[in-house]
Image (cartoon, rainbow, N blue to C red):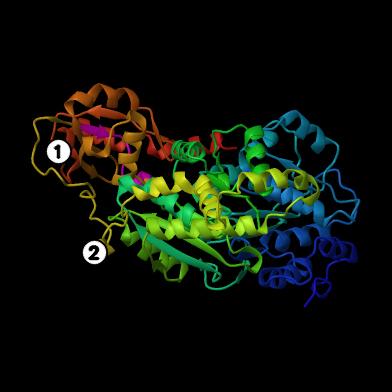
């Protein structure tokens, strides 16, 4: 089947052909004919990289046959990067259609310029929720003539706390519109969107719901928490031609990992929400042009990265939401290519692998962190291949050859080779000569998640007179786990993990022990730090023994009120504003 067979106008087909596409993908083949002929609502479920943008973008472009003052099509997506990517794709789809104008509106860019473009008339708006809400409240946009609304990456918009914004936006659109929802996963929250905003939608699912891309090999490695960064370097070194994404949980950790890699000679840059739009554009352009080899990113910032030849996705930590793993791994193996998704876990996280396997209906392969010897061998082979493939500029180098040959006259061919290899490789060899085994042992006991209220590192069951007990305002409901809390503390204070004692994660708050000498450092630097966009409050508590009863943790109602009013309920809406 070709795009002509789907019923698209010849100008639209020509634009797609100009882009080098000949046959529609499965989601396009099933969605486009329906969206062209019917005004009913629609739910499309397919993995990242399977062509969802064209599945809704081509029908939208096809529907517009004359110039428009007010938008007929509205696409809502979670991030600036995805917003720009979709807008650029739609401009390519409509390049032979003079009547189709497309405008991207998102935070971090000049709103006055966006308002002027909308006032001049635009057929299709691609927007992030926060900026679109601003435009509606300013009365700078009229959505009364919208015929089709697309909710792209709906699951991520909910994760980012955009539900209220979506309610507000959709209330400004006509009841007669068609609503098309596209997502890689179908958690219960997305199913609720379909129920609330749509009427008897046709649902098309490519593969099993939430199923992963079959072209991706999923591999996990077990390491001790302190060896996570060293293990990351080994995975990179074992794949010399890697062009990939490294996913971290937090913006702070993303920046730290990227900076460490850069200082050690790796070609890496960070992408996260704290960067300005100009910085984000610069980093993304470098990545798309392959000027950098590795992009270290948060889940949110990586949405909208549409690069076909990513070879590896490395999960420096697993995401807090299982569904986000599908989005991460879907950045590789695009357009039918093969790819690898590599995961680093600590000895307490094996149960998470089981959860993901069940969700994506695919099995992980357990592997060991490569040994120093195997890494050196593959790096040497890679270097030799590069030398053999190097193109010699005969005309420029010819005049230097006699002097070079004379300089090497006293050396044999074997000695010359050894010296050239050593000149390039000695530092690498020296590093790995001192490197040990980073693999950690897993047992079957880690197959199940820790029981609630006892997730901590129970190294010190008894009261230690040299330790102080701290109260933390976030808990299991906020996605906090012992490893995450440990990273926040160590990153903020510079303390080693060995300085932290027992950690107990409760449903709404947490506790940890630390040396009394570190109290001021912890209170000053950890309190106010962020975990997944949520501010952490840390206080010293007098009680040393945790309890499943919240009243008993701090003594009486004082402890309960802290747990119940920790601010977690409003954290999502706070994050949505900062990431518009």
Q: Secondary structure at mark 2?
A: loop
Image point 61% across, 49% down: which residue?
409
Q: Which residue is mark 1?
A: 552
Work out whether residue 34 can be spotted: yes
Q: Position of residue 481 (x, y in %)?
A: 31, 47
**Quick check: is 475 in the magenta stretch?**
yes
> Can you name the residue that lies furthest to the front here?
410
Q: Which mark is residue 237?
A: none
Image point 29% across, 29% down: which residue?
538
Horizontal side of residue 57 vs 245, given as left or right:
right
Viewer-nearest of labels 2 and 1? 2
Q: Nearer the viewer, residue 374 or 285?
A: 374
Q: Position of residue 430 (x, y in %)?
A: 40, 46
Give the magenta range.
469-478
- Quarter location, residue 487: top left
Relative to residue 497, is residue 176 depicted above or below? below
Q: Which residue is mark 2?
A: 443
Crowdedness of circle 1 by 10 Å Cα count: few (<14), some, many (20+)? some
Q: Position of residue 448 (x, y in %)?
A: 27, 62
Q: Position of residue 59 (x, y in %)?
A: 77, 62
Q: Secondary structure at mark 1?
A: helix
Q: Quadrant of the C terminus?
A: top right
Q: Earlier in the sequence, mark 2 or mark 1?
A: 2
Q: What is the distance, in whole Å, between disc 2 and disc 1 at their CAs?
A: 34 Å
Horizontal side of residue 574 vs 306, given as left or right:
left
**Quick check: is 202 in the magenta stretch?**
no
Q: Quadrant of the N terminus?
A: bottom right
């Amino acid at each position: 089947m070709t795009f002509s067979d789907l019923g698209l106008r010849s100008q639209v087909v020509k634009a797609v052909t100009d882009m080098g596409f000949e046959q529609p993908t499965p989601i396009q083949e099933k969605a486009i004919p329906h969206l062209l002929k019917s005004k009913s609502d629609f739910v499309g479920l397919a993995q990242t990289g399977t062509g969802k943008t064209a599945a809704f973008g081509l029908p939208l472009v096809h529907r517009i046959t004359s110039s428009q003052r007010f938008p007929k099509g509205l696409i809502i997506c979670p991030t600036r990067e995805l917003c720009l990517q979709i807008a650029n794709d739609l401009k390519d789809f409509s390049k032979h259609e003079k009547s189709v104008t497309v405008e991207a509106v998102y935070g971090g860019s000049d709103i006055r310029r966006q308002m002027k473009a909308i006032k001049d008339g635009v057929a299709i708006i691609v927007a992030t929720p926060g900026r679109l809400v601003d435009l509606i409240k300013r009365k700078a946009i009229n959505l009364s003539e919208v015929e089709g609304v697309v909710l792209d990456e709906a699951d991520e918009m909910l994760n980012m706390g955009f539900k209220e914004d979506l309610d507000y936006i959709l209330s400004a659109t006509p009841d007669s519109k068609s609503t098309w929802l596209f997502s890689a996963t179908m958690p219960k929250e997305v199913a609720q969107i379909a129920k609330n905003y749509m009427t008897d939608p046709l649902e098309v699912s490519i593969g099993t719901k939430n199923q992963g891309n079959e072209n991706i090999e999923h591999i996990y490695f077990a390491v001790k928490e302190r060896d996570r960064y060293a293990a990351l370097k080994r995975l990179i070194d074992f794949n010399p031609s890697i062009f990939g994404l490294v996913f971290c949980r937090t913006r702070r950790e993303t920046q730290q990992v990227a900076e460490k890699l850069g200082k050690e000679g790796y070609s890496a840059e960070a992408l996260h929400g704290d960067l300005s739009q100009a910085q984000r554009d610069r980093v993304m352009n470098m990545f798309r042009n392959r000027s950098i080899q590795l992009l270290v990113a948060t889940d949110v910032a990586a949405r909208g990265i549409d690069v076909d030849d990513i070879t590896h996705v490395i999960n420096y930590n697993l995401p807090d939401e299982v569904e986000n793993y599908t989005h991460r791994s879907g950045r590789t193996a695009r357009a039918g290519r093969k790819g690898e998704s590599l995961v680093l876990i600590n000895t307490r996280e094996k149960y998470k692998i089981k959860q993901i396997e069940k969700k994506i209906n695919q099995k992980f392969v357990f592997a060991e962190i490569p040994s120093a010897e195997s890494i050196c061998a593959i790096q040497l082979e890679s270097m030799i291949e590069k030398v053999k493939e190097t193109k010699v500029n005969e005309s420029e180098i010819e005049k230097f050859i006699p002097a070079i040959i004379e300089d090497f006259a006293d050396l044999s061919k074997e000695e010359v080779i050894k010296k050239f290899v050593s000149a390039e490789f000695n530092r690498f060899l020296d590093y790995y000569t001192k490197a040990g085994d980073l693999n950690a042992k897993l047992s079957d006991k880690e197959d199940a998640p820790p029981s609630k209220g006892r997730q901590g590192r129970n190294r010190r069951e008894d009261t230690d007179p040299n330790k102080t007990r701290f109260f933390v305002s976030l808990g299991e409901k906020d996605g906090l786990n012992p490893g995450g809390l440990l990273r926040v503390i160590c990153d903020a204070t510079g303390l080693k993990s060995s300085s932290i004692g027992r950690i107990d994660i409760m449903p709404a708050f947490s506790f940890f022990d630390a040396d009394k000498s570190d109290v001021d450092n912890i209170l000053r630097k950890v309190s106010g730090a962020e975990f997944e966009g949520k501010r952490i409050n840390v206080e010293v508590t007098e009680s040393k023994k945790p309890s499943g009863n919240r009243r008993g943790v701090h003594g009486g109602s004082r402890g309960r009120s802290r747990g119940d009013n920790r601010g977690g309920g409003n954290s999502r809406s706070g994050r949505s504003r900062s990431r518009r």
